[in-house]
Image: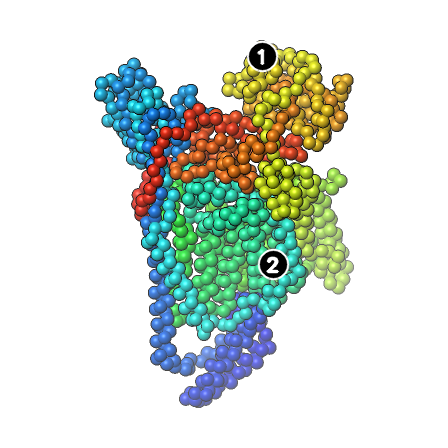
Amino acid sequence: MSTVDGPAGDFRVIRGVLKGIRAGKRAAVAGSGDDGARRLFHSGRKRAARRAEAPGPGILPEPGLTCDDAAALGRFTAEIRRDTKLRAVPTPDSDAAASTRAGHRWLIIGLGLVSALAAVLFTVAPVNTGTTTYRWDGAQDTALPLYPYHPAKLDATVRCADPNGLLLATTPPNGKQGAEPVAGGLEIRAVDGTVRAVLGGTELFRQRAGGDCTLTVHADGEGTTVGTARTTGRPIVTGLYTEHPGTVSAQIEPDTRWVSTPGAAKVALGVVSLLALLGLIVLLIRRDRGAARGVRLLPRRAWVPRPADLVVTGVLGVWSVVGALTVDDGYISTMLRARETSGFTGNYFRWFNAPEAPWGWYYELYALLGRVTPAMVWMRLPSVLLGLASWFLIDRVVLPRLVNRPARWTRWSAAALFLAWYVAFDVGLRPEPWIVFGSLAVFALVERAVATGAVTPVAAGLVVAGATATTNPLGIAAFLPFIAGVRPLVRLVRRSGDLRVLGTVAVVVGAGASALLTAFYDQPLTAVLESTAVRQKIGPDLPWQSEINRYATLLDPSVVEGALNRRVPVLLMLLAMALTAVLLIWRRAPGLAVGPARRMVVISVLCLVVLAFTPTKWTHHFGALAGFGTVVIAMLVHTVARGALSSVWARAATLGLVAATTWLAWSAPNWWWMQSDYDVRWGDTVPTVKGVRLADLALWAGLAVALAGVVAGAWQSARHRAGAGRAPRWLPRSGWVIVAVAAATVAVEVVGQAQAVKLRWGTYSVGRSNLASLGLAAGAGHAGNACGVEDWLDVEPDIGAGVLRPSAPASAEGFATNTAFPPDSPPRAPFGSDPEHPAWSSYGSPSRTGTLVTGWYDLPADAGSPDSPPVVISRAGHGKVRVSVEFAKADGTVLATVQAKADDTGKWLDARFDPRWQAPGAQRVRVVARDEDPGPSGWVAVTAPRIPRLRPLTNVIPADEPVTLDWTNAFVVPCRTPASLADGIVQPVRYRFAPGQDAQSLVGVSYSADAGGPYVPLYADAKATELPTYLRGDKVREPVAVFRFDYPVAMRGLTVEHGTRSTSGLAKQTAVLDAKPGGSG
């Protein structure tokens, strides 16, 4: 028994058993030939071992070995070893038993090696890759938005007898271009009898036209050939265009390398690996029955619900309905929906839709759930169940291993701490809940192996760790319990003499190789390597030296990643890690099992190290630490309650540290992502009560109490009173303050979201929508009750229809009417085109500055009603400019002046105003614009005000029509099918659902060629016209912006062929990111 890893045991029982061992020893020495004496000696040793490791609740006997017990138990262990230093007199095993053990060992070795070898071969086994071929006869132009942008293969034949005109282009020529033309296409044109081929802006080929002139074009992964000229680049293809129908034909095969299904050999190898692994586990279980110590896995009545369980279940259940979105819910939900047509789970919004492999096997489970219903509450169910399972592990398994007889208050403190973590980070579609559960399960299995000497938990832990590690790069933290527990595990291996070295290696590689099955379940090795290369080349792929950025973001109150809800659990964990580590080093941690507690602290520190090597530095990755973070803080709370830090100086100092940590954690808004933040209490400001910041109140109160404790301690010491140095009873323990902070944070989060639902009952909120999908609230009336925010959205099909009429002309000094707009920023039609739709601009004004005051516009009588649309103006500008709207009574008495939100981008944006709240009783409105920038770049432009004429969104765009989605809004429009990325193209849909103005800066990757975004080809082929949307019941917010795509050239005249080819997992493939013409590709 180890003085670190074993329990304290019952020392009186051990003393009694020692006497039995000594008696057996004396009998054995006195009569070495007496078999009865030998049996007495061995039975005495076995009784000692059994009593010292007596089973109790938890994965180890209780009480756990505490710092106070360690020295005493060490003396008893030394006495046991000293009194049993007798040459072993074993009872010889029969030849049959030895032969059986040897046979089992070789069977274990064989199964382990077979499982590992089959798993390795599984990664390179052939897969069936889907292929698509598009044939074009050149009869008419066609859009063909390839994605990825370059074809895997292109073959074309061009007859170049005509002396002039466009012969072939793979991107739209002038006059047929979309909103954002792309460079990098191939253009073959005849000009004055000379044929020129240009690829990405670089001339590739030139020859005289006429006669029997025919060019052949071929492009593949090695490059492009036109006639006799060759280059290494490939053309971008968003369409096929010609001015000479019938003189050109083409055949294009898009890049569909990731559209694959496992081949027969791959399936067979996977089955063999799994069966061998199962057989290995069965043999290990049989082996452990006789070799391992019998220790209870769970405490008695473990399955009986406790009050803390009900609280955790209730809070997580409520949060699944009213709770906030996580940052990637929309991103992942779009990946899952697109999988139904693309055939694999790709990244959709960037990286050329490269698959997540070797990560993300759990997406397949979510995809199955999504086929039932894409409703938010349903899709959140796995994360809630994983949270409950994680809590069960913490409460029933992990805490009993770490602390000495966890009391009821320990359980309640752990529940509050766990909720502070899980509510803030983990209810959603991201992988962190899987990592939380998996890492806790691995820790429990490793500790059970240490406690019992069994090998089966080690193998099971490796399997669970492998599955966890392949959910996300941070999942590698699931292997950390093996690193932290390497010393006791090595001792376990040494004691497992029947396995020997080869058997141990077979168990480790056989169980560990199971990770390859989840990493390569759908993609072969080369495809996974290329997918990884694409993500690394495009990025972000930040080095470990940039890890400080994560913590800087956490402490930045101006971004949602630095909100109160994220700061509290993380900062409390960092504080608890430091204090617990010091207490364990100083052996001043009563109530903690030393070995397991040390390992838990080491694991938590190593988690932060692993976090540094993740390619991005977002704070939501901290959610993976919810399990270990909860346990570390609970350990500190427990040991403090059991007497640690009991002196007045220590208690006062730690109380000051907790107060400072609370101040830092609460010095940020209760901010949530996107639509979850609508009308949430303290969502845009630091929590305050009657003007006093709660963070400041906590800091000064904590420091005042700590200082009072120091004064009381100094007074006791100066008076030499009895108990000098002890903390007075009225000085609170820091552990209880930590629990109070965590509980208060959870209350603020849950109540804040619930209050927002109540405040916004007449319009959209996440909770209101979820209640409607559950049938617990009426729908919005236009779209039913299960389509998320679409139930409350109206659209303005014609922005010119609701323009108000002025009662007097405008006063414009330095402004021009319907002219003088920047060439790249004209107003949206029909504004600026006629007197009925006026727009004013100071651009290019000779005076450089100016002031515009429009005439008064009469408001409709119902403009102030809750159901009326807002007052809207469009504005654009750059430099030192201001735009405001004045509301007045009928006689011109100004009631309110409301400033439009400043914007310096030069883009035309809508500003919305609600007279009901901003100017009650208003009957007139006018626009005031000031250009105060004397520089040549300063200008401002505005339009006349309008009252939009609206229609329900689903009446304009049917709910079953596919659209392009963005990750910021996809989860709140569950009825929408995203544009398909199947067959190597982006489906040319008619509409795009983009984020509103407040979130548009977050989604640049989806239409960025540098990021490999899917919407680049659509913007190259189509014009985009915005159709403003309005949230019924909330006049000023725009959660979803809608754009209509108009294609100058439709996708037509193509013959499509589908096929399948077998692709080896070792086959060399062309890089997706090759040398791209024109610097793009």
Between disc 2 and disc 1, the foreground one is 1
Q: Residue furthest top?
A: 846
Is 17 left, or right, of 922 in this rendering?
Answer: left
Residue 4 visible? The answer is: yes
Res 31 quadrant in image: bottom left
Res. 925 mark: none
Nearest to the observer: residue 830 or residue 350 = 830
Residue drawn at (36%, 75%) of the image: 100
Marks 2/1: CA–CA distance = 70 Å
Q: Estimate the x, y position of residue 245 in percent, counting from the top left.
A: 33, 22
Q: Position of residue 796 (x, y in %)?
A: 59, 27
**What's the mark number on residue 845?**
1
Say which label, 2 or 1, has the lower sequence index.
2
Which amino acid type is shown beneath numbered disc 1?
Ser
* In the depicted structure, whether residue 1081 falls above or below residue 457: above
**Residue, disc 2:** 635
The residue located at (41%, 81%) in the rendering is 90
